[in-house]
Image (tube, rainbow, N blue to C red):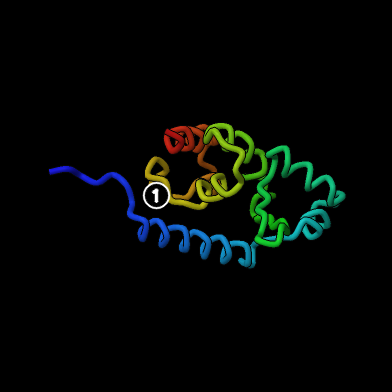
Amino acid sequence: MTRVLYATVEETAILLREGKKYRHERLRSADMFTVTEAASLLNVDASTIVTWISGGRCIGLAGPDGTLRIPRWQFEPSAWSAIQPIARSLGTRDPWQVLVFLETPAPALEGLTPRVALERGISIDRVLDAAIADAH
């Protein structure tokens, strides 16, 4: 018996539709900042935030209209210094991939999300190991 390894056209359409719905809802979440709000919180210029996003220092997610939204929690000390190393360990600069990794429970972290693991003081090395495993 031959096992089908690929999704059908219909299954693919459903996956894409669900992904679009997730992104839309996530961008509208209460924990998302605008560039201006993030700049005000951190007492820097908005251009600094944009530079950090383009350099991969922080996560900036573009909405359908091109407006950037920024997860507020990443500016907490436990997460701030971890964003770039995590992206490198994942082998990506795609902010959505980094965000999804940080917000998805990881078996290697006893089912905690990497974000929560960092907040609870689990070592960055363990989180980076989980990212490397996730990337493969």
101 vs 67: above or below: above
Q: Which one is in front, 15 or 111?
A: 15
Residue at 51% across, 41% down: 122
**Where does residue 90 sit, x and y in percent of width and height?**
52, 36
Under mark 1, the amino acid is Gly
Label 1 CA crowd tier, 10 Å (few <14, some 14–19, many 20+): few
Residue at 75% across, 60% down: 34
**Where does residue 16 sit, x and y in percent of width and height?**
46, 58
**Where does residue 62 sit, x and y in percent of width and height?**
67, 55
Q: Which one is in front, 63 or 122?
A: 63
In this view, the residue farthest toward the left is 1
Q: What element carries label 1?
A: loop
Q: Mark 1 — residue?
A: 111
Residue at 50% across, 46% down: 101
From the viewer's perspective, is 88 left or right of 41? left
**Where does residue 126 sit, x and y in percent of width and height?**
48, 35
The number of numbered discs placed on residues in the rendered structure image is 1
Q: Which one is in front, 6 or 131?
A: 6
From the viewer's perspective, is 95 left or right of 127? right
From the viewer's perspective, is 6 left or right of 74? left
Residue at 37% across, 44% down: 107
Pick the quarter of the image with the N terminus. top left
Q: Quadrant of residue 3?
A: top left
Q: Which one is in front, 19 or 97?
A: 19
Pick the quarter of the image with the C terminus. top left
